[in-house]
Amino acid sequence: MRSSLTLLGTLWAFLSLVTAVASSTSYFLPYWLFGSQLGKPVSFSTFRRCNYPVRGEGQSLIMVEECGRYASFSAIPSLAWQMCTVVTGAGCALLLLVALAAVLGCCMEELISRMMGRCMGAAQFVGGLLISSGCVLYPLGWNSPEIMQTCGNVSNQFQLGTCRLGWAYYCAGGGAAAAMLICTWLSCFAGRNPKPVMLVESIMRNTNSYAMELDHCLKP
């Protein structure tokens, strides 16, 4: 089974898969921000949360220790986090799509040419840029009441208060940076240049196929 990728292209496909999985996994895990509320640890992502307060008997607040996503898009604590959810999700989807095509290129001949590889690298740059934009938007939501309650009521935009950033935030940002810088550069050398003989054979094969179909359609 002949690959359509060069040796550097194989490395590109592997790194593309790693960065896409790292960024997408971090996007779904609620470990972007860590704080505490009512003596219990609390963590957030853009659209998920672990441990949240509810009204118990006697109208007292108790903490429910479980993870889940917000009930609706509008329930996400701030507009900045809503934008971050959309932008980061789009970037992760783009990186996953390119990574899937790159992995298929390892197993299929003539799937990824030199020009196609560069176009896919451009798509990776856009995907990484979207995720990076999401990471920049994320601190803009730290002044929402829900986050302030978790961060000692002293947090603000780009000020964590008593909270701290989680490993998933750094993982998402690192995956985006690797996709933009390393994967985009490697994609320029990923695809094989089509051989002239193979190109002529492909053109002739397609021409014969079209001629046969036209002849079939013109027959009474």
Image (spheres, rainbow, N blue to C red):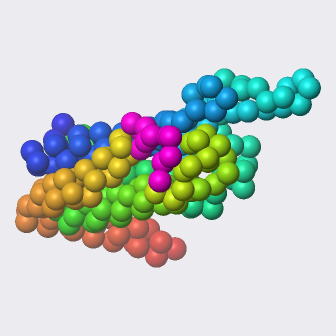
Tell whether 18 sits left or right of 151. left
Q: What residue range appears in magenta?
A: 159-169
Q: Is 15 displayed left or right of 24 in the figure?
A: left
Q: Nearer the viewer, residue 36 or 22?
A: 36
Q: Is residue 198 magenta?
A: no
Position in image of residue 11 (x %, y %): 16, 43
In this rendering, does residue 211 appear at all?
Answer: yes
Q: Is residue 69 above or below residue 96?
A: above
Question: Residue at 7% across / 65% down in the picture?
Answer: 196
x and y percent of residue 116 in the render? 25, 63
Q: Residue at x 11, y 48 (%)?
A: 8
- Toward the right, the furthest residue is 58
Residue at screen point 40% across, 67% down: 213
Against 112, residue 105 (above or below) is above
In the image, is residue 166 part of the stretch drawn in magenta? yes
The image position of residue 185, as x and y in percent, is 16, 59
Q: Nearer the viewer, residue 92 or 103?
A: 92
Please give left or right for residue 31 compared with residue 62 in the image: left
Front residue of 163 and 14: 163
